[in-house]
Image (spheres, coloured by chain):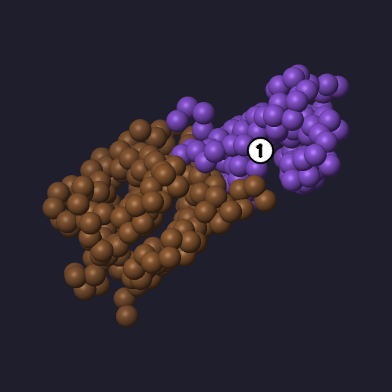
Amino acid sequence: MPAPDDPSGPPGRLSRRTALAAAVGVTALTAGCKLHGIDIRSDRTPHPTPSPTPDLAPDVLVAATVLDHEQAVLDRIDATVAAHPRLVDRLASARAGHRAHVQLLTKAVPTPARPGASPSASPSPSPTSILTPPLSATPSASPSAYASPTAVPHDPHKALRSLGRLEEQLAMDDKRSAFAAQSGSFARVLASMGAAAAQQSAVLAGRDRS
Amino acid sequence: MSSKVHALQQALGAEHAALYVYDVVGGRLSVSAHPGLARRVAAAYTTHRGRRDQLTAMVRSAHAQPVAAEISYQLPTPCRTTPELERAALLTEQRCAQVYAALVGASSQATRQYAIDALADTAVRELGFGGIPAAFPGLPEM
């Protein structure tokens, strides 16, 4: 069985991340591997033994992965609000935060060379996306928590707890990406996104004033 | 001085200041009137003291002389009322979030992991002192 993100897998299982990574990979190689808006050329020194011609493509792939995760959590928040309109205020800050993350990463990652390569290649959610069943519009081949096939729980408390677990997962993954990033300034941004998810997770779990 | 050592020293300096502030806040807070806040302040003090010791060791292992604590620091608020005490704690955590974010950017490997975890911890700690979740904790320019 091919790895979940293996581009050679069945074409129908092409996730947004795979499509995006493939597209930005091509762009990155031809465009000098630049993450727009985040200067990753000025500070490649933190790594003790930088290669003479550092390959910055890995950071573009890291950005595409984080973008995929952040978008999935944003989609789940939208789905939760669609199912429980009363939670809109409660989730406003999480929604705004992840939206800001998605916007930044969308700008940072070079535009996919092939528009329409995948309908989900565009990370900006369509206005109707919250009307569709949760995550069904953006299926992910990744076997992670983000690909949760379950519907939003009917009980609003359970729905919030489920989101809290997702935020916790995102915090861990963002932090892992921050560790892996080659660029120091990009790592700083990713670590901050991880801290933001940790804050949201604490709020949703009621651990913020404990 | 390498940027990593500089960032480590900045973090250590922030932890020295944090301990000073928490010492004042803990001393002036009424434990009986605000047991929850007092518990969070005490927990924060313990955490920051641990970080100060860890950062001191990290600076030493980078073959540098750890910066010493100042005799006194300007408090971030007058620290006379309970809201002022709580706000002083919040501002202290926000300052720490900034230096740990900077340390993430200036380091790699174990030091970067340490800074990533400290940033998330301090961001969550902000919430216990009246902070609200931010899109980019520790990044004042965002």
Q: Which residue: 41% across, 51% down?
A: A87
User: To which residue does mark 1 refer?
Assistant: B129
Tell me residue B74's x, y (percent): 76, 19
Q: Which residue: 21% across, 48% down?
A: A126
Tell me residue B125's x, y (percent): 65, 43
Tell me residue A181's x, y (percent): 47, 48
- In the depicted view, which residue is nearer to us: A58 or A12? A12
Categorize mark 1 by other alpha carbons within 10 Å: few (<14), some (14-19), many (20+): many
Q: Is residue A32 in sight in this rendering?
A: no
Say left or right for A155 vs A81.
right
Q: Which residue: 46% across, 58% down?
A: A160
Tell me residue A170's x, y (percent): 47, 56
Label 1: which secondary element: loop
Can you name the residue that lies furthest to the bottom here? A1
Dividing the picture into quarters, in which one does residue A143 lie?
Answer: bottom left
Q: Which chain is purple?
A: B
Q: Is residue B17 above or below residue B120?
A: above
Q: Which residue: 84% across, 42% down?
A: B32
- In the depicted view, which residue is nearer to us: A45 or B87? B87
Q: Amino acid at mark 1?
A: Phe
